[in-house]
Image (tube, grey):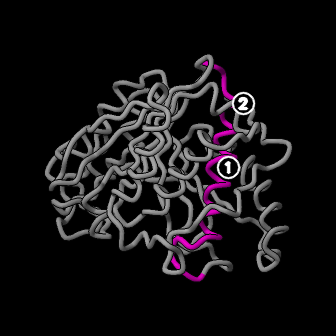
Amino acid sequence: MAMFVFPETPWCAPRSIPGGSCDDAVVLTEASEQVIYDIYDALAEAFPDQIKKQVMGEVMSHKINRYTIMPRKALWHRIPVVTLLHGREAGCAWTAAHFFRLLLLEDDPRLDILRNHVCFDVIPVANPWGFAHDLRKNANGIDLNRNFAPDFVYDRDPESSEYGGPFPGSETETQVLMQLLEENKDATVVLDYHNVGNRYPLFYTYGGPEVQLAETVFPALTKKWQQDYPQLRDVPALGLHKPNGHEGMFADYIISKGLWALTMETPMTMPGLSQTKFDTPTIHISLEVLVNTLLTITASMPKK
């Protein structure tokens, strides 16, 4: 197991990064997948030799795009990144898109290891129909994060918010993610990125190195955030880890392929700080979780 080492100084989100709330130019709860794709498409146009775009599928006229971002130097790590598997969790897709924009357009030397030595294979909107309709499920009324083998649950009520469908892998969106893993069999980690409601950031645990990673990343970020936001100073810990069930989730499928699954959740609204869904402070905190976690992993894990 890796001994994780957090950056000596936490990476800080630029204050210029916009939120996606009713107080911002883009309201994510009223947007479609194109608001996310626009960011990636602009990067693909600017870096045609480094970014490969593929349309992996289509659901009710909503495309599922994939963007493979190649490193500028020697390949050390492959990291597939999946966001927006649940359609109401648009903040994770917005956060990740702005991370990649910073990675490619800004000259921040602290991101050099990620820019130069990591291949990111990204499905930025895994549930485009759900995003366009601000719903957790897909167009067939299926929770895509319950539509995988192993541990698929066959007898769940179709009206349940966690209904996983008639059989594992029944959905186009699920099949796209299965193909993604088939083409990344040597991944260092697979980032399964979600949003949680009015709760602190967390990593779900499956018996791998997630607890150690959480206990490395979150105390350091708690210290930073309590300096940045005085209203958070009375809270002992601003990041959590908790066991996750095995119910046909994407993480179950990742683990079944012999890969490390990191299921990360950042808040829709940060408790004690935010007032509106996906507002600017929440996006900044989410970006700091994402980037500092990636820096910690890539600096600590063996090169592939």
Q: Earlier in the sequence, mark 1 or mark 2?
A: 1
The verdict on residue 204 being magenta is no
Q: Position of residue 161 (x, y in %)?
A: 28, 68
Q: Quadrant of residue 222?
A: bottom right
Above or below, 164 against 256 in this view is: below
Q: Residue furthest front?
A: 46
Q: Position of residue 167 (x, y in %)?
A: 16, 46
> Of circles 1 and 2, which is in front?
2
> What is the count of numbered marks?
2
Q: Quadrant of residue 229?
A: bottom right
Q: Residue furthest bottom?
A: 275
- Residue at the location (32% across, 43% down)? 65
Secondary structure beneath label 2:
helix
Residue 214 circle label = 1
Quarter containing the N terminus:
top right
Q: Amino acid at mark 2?
A: Ser
Magenta span covers which residues?
Answer: 275-304
- Residue at the location (28% across, 58% down)? 143
Secondary structure beneath label 1:
helix
Residue 300 circle label = 2
The verdict on residue 299 being magenta is yes
